[in-house]
Image (spheres, rainbow, N blue to C red):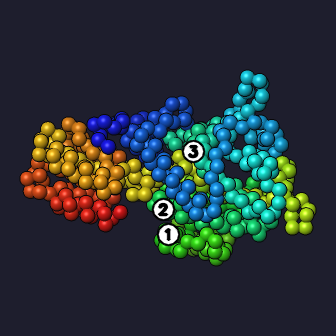
């Protein structure tokens, strides 16, 4: 993509409405624009990252055996009256009447709707287990929408729902999601720590919040320092294996939010314990028959008796993750994208767009980069070198290749790694090779 043609409205000054770094950088890098409080448009650069995050989540969900469908954003109130949540949900739920005066709502989550789909289709234990998911916009009329996409009112969530015949089956489904979550976040360059979470009024059930450490996080957290070294992707992946040992291994290490933190239960000495702030990027929940019971989602068991199915639900904040990744990976100059979610792999900078030789060298390398499969943002604008460097650092592509008159004369380009700041002068072909080796 040529930057001269790209829709990338960069902002030089820090926007005064943004209190945290990810919000500031997303506005400045032309990724999002607010349309009303907590509701955003995703501009081309931001939308590319959102799609990459979504793709990683989808790949791990599919690998774990979950099946994707798509439920609507608008739901009928009747289903929520069946579960008893229509009255309970309070002002966070956006309620709407259609022209026939029917009560509708913009879904804040989908337990009721998926349970309705399930009960209409599945009648026998033989058709279990099933895990279904979708990636869809949600609306929650948060009291205080803030921090950009981190706490929005409209936000993109991946939500999965598992259905099993008994509690043992439900734990297997839970463990698969536990693994899928750890892998998804690790693939985005994040260290997300599963922490025992409150299970709310039903109690007794199992729930983990996945939390990444960041200064601007909304909750205080405590964890074993071993978490800071953990390498999730080093473990072999077999979603069909017995995942209980994996689950135990990663839940043995102490980790708790302040609500759950209990110094009496914490084996880590106080001076070793990591005390930090965290951002919740995912939440998994086993809640048994909370919805299947009142909504009559039953199947015939092996002995013919009707059994209410055991359910779990599993959410990932896809749009929040874009902000969370920036919170975890930036410097004073801007964003530092992990390669897996970067909007482009490479930024190619022509230092002198008025110089025919520079243009020829850049155009040639641009063609080669595209042919080799590197999604490239080519800064072909007539701007000062300083402005170009600042723009590239701000948008944070993993690699920058800079071509100027001096390099053209010497037959070299400058290759810069955004994360390490390391620079090397080498031939265009050697630069291509180095990118290939790093990919
Ligand atoms: P929080 O405690 O942050 O309000 P929650 O516990 O209400 O979140 P869940 O119902 O567990 O959220 O939703 C699943 C995931 O959706 C969360 O882990 C989070 O990543 C994301 N999410 C929830 N609310 C928002 C929001 N207002 N804006 C952006 N993402 C959100
Ligand atoms: Mg939660």
Point out residue 363 in the picture as x, y percentages from the top left corner: 21, 46
The span from disc 2 to disc 3 (Cα, nearest Å) is 19 Å
Q: Is mark 3 on a helix, strand or loop?
A: strand
Point out residue 233 in the picture as x, y percentages from the top left corner: 50, 69
Point out residue 400 in the picture as x, y percentages from the top left corner: 27, 53
> Which residue lies at the image location 25% right of the left edge and 50% below the top edge?
367
The span from disc 3 to disc 1 (Cα, nearest Å) is 25 Å
Left or right, 203 with reference to 431: right
- The answer to whether the residue labelled 1 contacts the one labelled 2, judged by CB atoms less than 8 Å apart, is yes
Label 3 lies in ligand 1 vicinity (Cβ under 8 Å): no
Compared to 23, does 256 lie above or below? Answer: below
Compared to 378, does 245 lie above or below? Answer: below
**Number of numbered discs on residues:** 3
Point out residue 314 in the picture as x, y percentages from the top left corner: 66, 56
10 Å neighbourhood of mark 2: few (<14), some, or many (≥20)? many
Left or right, 82 with reference to 437: right
Q: Which residue was labeled with disc 3?
A: 156
Q: Which mark, by number, is residue 187?
A: 2
Q: Which mark, by number, is residue 437?
A: none
Instruction: Between residue 332 and residue 344, name the one nearer to us.
Output: 344
Q: In which quarter of the image is residue 131?
A: bottom right
* Mark 3 / mark 1, whichever is N-terminal: 3
> Which residue lies at the image location 77% right of the left edge and 69% below the top edge?
168
Label 2 lies in ligand 1 vicinity (Cβ under 8 Å): no
Q: Which mark, by number, is residue 233?
A: 1
The span from disc 1 to disc 2 (Cα, nearest Å) is 8 Å
- Residue 220 visible? The answer is no
């Amino acid at each position: 993509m040529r930057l001269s043609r790209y829709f990338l409205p960069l902002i030089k000054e820090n926007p005064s409405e943004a209190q945290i770094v990810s919000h500031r950088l997303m506005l400045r890098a032309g990724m999002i624009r607010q349309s009303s409080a907590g509701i955003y448009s995703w501009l081309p650069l931001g939308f590319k990252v959102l799609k990459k995050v979504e793709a990683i989540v989808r790949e791990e969900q599919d690998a774990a055996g979950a099946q994707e469908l798509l439920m609507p954003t608008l739901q009928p109130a009747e289903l929520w009256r069946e579960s008893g949540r229509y009255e309970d949900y309070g002002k966070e739920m956006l309620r709407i009447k259609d022209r026939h005066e029917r009560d509708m709502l913009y879904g804040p989550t989908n337990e009721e709707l998926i349970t309705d789909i399930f009960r209409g289709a599945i009648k026998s234990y033989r058709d279990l287990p099933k895990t279904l998911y979708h990636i869809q916009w949600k609306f929650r009329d948060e009291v205080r929408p803030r921090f950009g996409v981190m706490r929005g009112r409209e936000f993109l969530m991946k939500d999965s729902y598992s259905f099993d015949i008994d509690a043992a089956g439900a734990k297997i489904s839970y463990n698969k999601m536990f693994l899928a979550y750890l892998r998804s976040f690790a693939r985005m360059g994040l260290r997300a720590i599963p922490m025992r979470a409150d299970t709310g009024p039903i109690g007794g059930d199992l729930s983990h919040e996945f939390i990444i450490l960041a200064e601007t996080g909304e909750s205080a957290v405590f964890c074993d320092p071993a978490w800071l070294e953990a390498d999730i992707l080093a473990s072999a992946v077999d979603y069909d294996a017995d995942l209980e040992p994996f689950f135990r291994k990663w839940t043995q290490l102490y980790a708790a939010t302040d609500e759950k933190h209990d110094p009496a239960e914490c084996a880590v000495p106080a001076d070793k314990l990591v005390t930090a702030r965290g951002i919740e990027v995912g939440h998994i929940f086993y809640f048994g028959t909370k919805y299947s019971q009142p909504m009559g989602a039953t199947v015939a068991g092996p002995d013919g008796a009707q059994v209410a199915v055991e359910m779990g639900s599993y959410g990932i904040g896809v749009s929040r993750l874009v902000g969370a990744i920036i919170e975890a990976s930036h410097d004073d100059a801007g964003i530092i994208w992990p390669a897996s979610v970067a909007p482009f792999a490479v930024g190619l900078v022509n230092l002198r767009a008025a110089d025919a030789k520079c243009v020829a060298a850049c155009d040639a390398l641009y063609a080669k980069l595209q042919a080799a499969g590197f999604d490239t943002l080519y800064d072909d604008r007539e701007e000062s070198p300083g402005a170009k460097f600042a723009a590239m650092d701000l948008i944070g592509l993993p690699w920058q290749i800079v071509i100027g008159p001096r390099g053209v004369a010497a037959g070299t380009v400058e290759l810069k790694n955004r994360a390490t700041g390391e620079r090397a002068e080498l031939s265009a072909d050697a630069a291509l090779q180095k990118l290939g080796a790093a990919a």
